[in-house]
Image: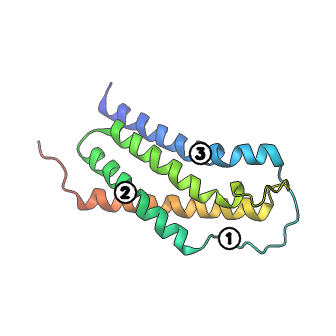
Amino acid sequence: MAPRVHLLLCCALSLAAVVAAPVVWAGPVIHRYGIGGASDGSLGLFMSPGWYVVSWLATAPLLVLAAETVVRGHPWAATCCVTVAVFALAWVGTLPVWLRFFGTQEPVTFDALRMAACSYALLLVGAAVISVAWAFVTPTRSG
């Protein structure tokens, strides 16, 4: 397979993981309890900043490894690292949807969905910045 096609396929698989990860974590809860419920706007748009810092610090080694393997010419290894990191970020980002207290049977509110979507997007932007920054700092392989 040509290197360019190989890299494009790896990018496509990473993008598919970005879409699939929140569905894996939040999908079963939404399917089971539905969407609706009272929406009073009390949740805001984003989770607390601590969640972002912890998530980025926890996934930074995977993101750095992904950037390193791309620079060194191993896109499949990078795809695996990115996929694992994305699923971890989606687990944190979708907390407002799937974290249910005291066995509640209430539907998922629109506020929780909005907060999860905004938080997940912010987590992905931070992860992309970490990966790109490391790829620029790392010297390219000579050959």
* Sooner in the amino-acid sequence: mark 3 or mark 1: 3
Q: Is residue 87 above or below residue 3?
A: below
How far apart are the alpha carbons under marks 1 and 2? 25 Å
Give 1 or 84, whichever is nearer the viewer: 84
Which quadrant would the N terminus be assigned to in this image?
A: top left
Secondary structure of residue under mark 2: helix
What type is the residue that disc 3 sits on? Answer: Val
Q: In the rendered view, does 95 fall on the left or right side of 74?
A: right
Q: Amino acid at mark 2?
A: Ser
Picture quarter with the C terminus: top left
Return the residue at label 3.
19
The residue type indicated by label 1 comes to Leu
Numbered label attached to residue 125: none
User: Left or right: where does residue 129 sit relative to residue 120?
Assistant: left
The residue depicted at 74 percent of the width and 47 percent of the height is 29
Q: Which residue is mark 2?
A: 131
Answer with mark 1 or mark 2, whichever residue precedes in sequence: 1
Q: Nearer the viewer, residue 27 or 132?
A: 27
Image-quadrant location for residue 94:
bottom right
Most extreme residue toward the right is 38
Q: Are there few (<14), some (14-19), or many (20+) residues within 10 Å of tag 3?
A: few
Q: Nearer the viewer, residue 136 or 83?
A: 83
- Which comes before the other along the chain, label 3 or label 2? 3
Q: CB atoms at circles 3 and 1 under 8 Å apart?
A: no
C-alpha distance separating marks 3 and 1? 20 Å
Residue 86 point in image, percent of width and height? 50, 50
Using the numbered discs, state the Cα–Cα distance from disc 3 to disc 2 in whole angstroms: 19 Å
Counting from the top left corner in percent of width and height, residue 122 is at 55, 64
- Left or right side of 80 for 136: left
- In the picture of the structure, the residue carrying the numbered disc 1 is 45
Where is residue 58 shown, x and y percent of the image?
43, 60
